[in-house]
Amino acid sequence: MEVFAFEAYAILKVLWWVLLGVLLGGIGVMVGMDMGVGTILRYVGRTDSERRVALNVIGPHWDGNQVWFILGGGAIFAAWPLVYATAFSGFYIVMLLLLWSMIVRPLGFEYRGKMPSDGWRAAWDATLFISGFLPMVVFGAAIGNVLQGVPFNFDWRLRSFYTGSFIELFNPFAILCGLMSVSLAVYMGGCMLGRAAGEPVGGRARTAAMAAAVAAIVLFTIGGFWVANLSGYQLVSGPAAAAQQTPLHQEVVYVPGALLVNYVKHPILWVLPGLAYAGLILGLVALAARRPLVAWWFGVLVWAGVIGAVGASMFPFLMPSITHPSHSLTVWNSGSSLRTLGWMTGFTIVFMPIIIWYTSWAFWVMRGKVDVKQIETSDHAL
């Protein structure tokens, strides 16, 4: 029985590493889609009525899509508490910046139409742009920083100390990753508008999505070569994978080319970045054929490939420490207890299908197109 529990604990840790990737991908797909619409709002909408079309396409869904953001944060808190505590204390200012930008998002939706003034509405359009662009930059930059390593270390009581600065978090590689995240958000948002918005908004959105796909291909390629030349982390020794442990019980070294070691050992992993390229190229083809819904699903494939490629590069690391590599947080040393992970798995089996079902149902029920005429004659439109 003890042997079974020991093995089950290791399996649950890996399972929740996979589920964390799924939740991050869900944030990119669902939350990123809405953020992308906010980012290109002033481009796809040349008049106030056209901008209202774009807002009403995502209006019924954007707040429900935030569930993925909450799930992601909740999963890190419950499954990886040491990662949550270390990241949220080290990235405190960035997290506040992210929260402030997202706080004004619902205000933009609710207050934009309260006055007919062009200046009033333009000001709220600006908040919708900021609350769309900035969170996706932060999302991508966070992934870029984790790939490089975060400046933190622990004392003997496992108190974490962040040794970097706010400016360091927006280093060149992190900015590249942030722009990649924004480009994918614009792609998803453009596909959404291309499917659900009438002309001319839908046509402009498809153009924006195609431009974003080309940008993402370029940025992903540059990022790939950059990662190949980055130094990474290698776990030299430590307790068994399923053993109760802390970051103080291991030895980690910082070595060149470590981010590609897993790909060398397991060549099948090259399928993951291949999925990203395939999704972007096929998405471009679908958009050129005026099939934005198909292109949207290819965008899901892209996010799966990108998040999967990052995870495969880093495994088993979740948050490596550039200050003291042996204090790095891994899948093995930063997870919750066996009982906690077991209960969380049970709840996930029950509630994840429900979330997917009601989200799909909401999009199916409100699947029609939104055009300028509908907006101008409706008393309930945003």
Image (cartoon, rainbow, N blue to C red):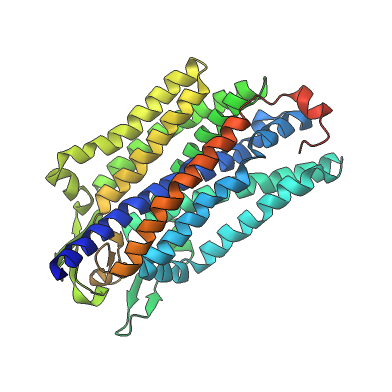
Near-viewer residue (232 or 26)? 26
Question: What's the residue at 33%, 36% (across, down)?
Answer: 221
Question: What's the residue at 48%, 55% (across, down)?
Answer: 71
Direction from residue 192 to residue 232 in the image, left or right: left
Q: Position of residue 364 (x, y in %)?
A: 57, 31
Q: Where is residue 84 in the image (x, y as percent from the top left)?
A: 42, 67
Residue 182 can be seen in this image: no
Near-viewer residue (255 or 92)? 92
Question: What is the quadrant of the N terminus in the image?
Answer: bottom left
Q: Which quarter of the picture shows residue 168?
A: bottom left
Direction from residue 36 to residue 9 in the image, left or right: left
Is 317 located above or below residue 275 in the figure?
A: below
Question: What is the quadrant of the C terminus in the image?
Answer: top right
Is 374 located above or below residue 310 in the figure?
A: above
Q: Where is residue 304 in the image (x, y as percent from the top left)?
A: 36, 40
Residue 240 can be seen in this image: yes
Direction from residue 97 to residue 127 in the image, left or right: right
Q: Position of residue 107 (x, y in %)?
A: 72, 52
Direction from residue 173 to residue 253 in the image, left or right: left
Is 272 located above or below residue 194 in the figure?
A: below
Q: Which quarter of the picture shows residue 255?
A: bottom left
Question: What's the residue at 33%, 38% (across, down)?
Answer: 305
Q: For the view shown, which residue lies furthest in the top direction?
A: 289
Is 222 located above or below residue 286 in the figure?
A: below
Q: For the view shown, which residue lies furthest in the front direction?
A: 1
Give the number of marks: 0
Q: For the view shown, which residue lies furthest in the right direction?
A: 116
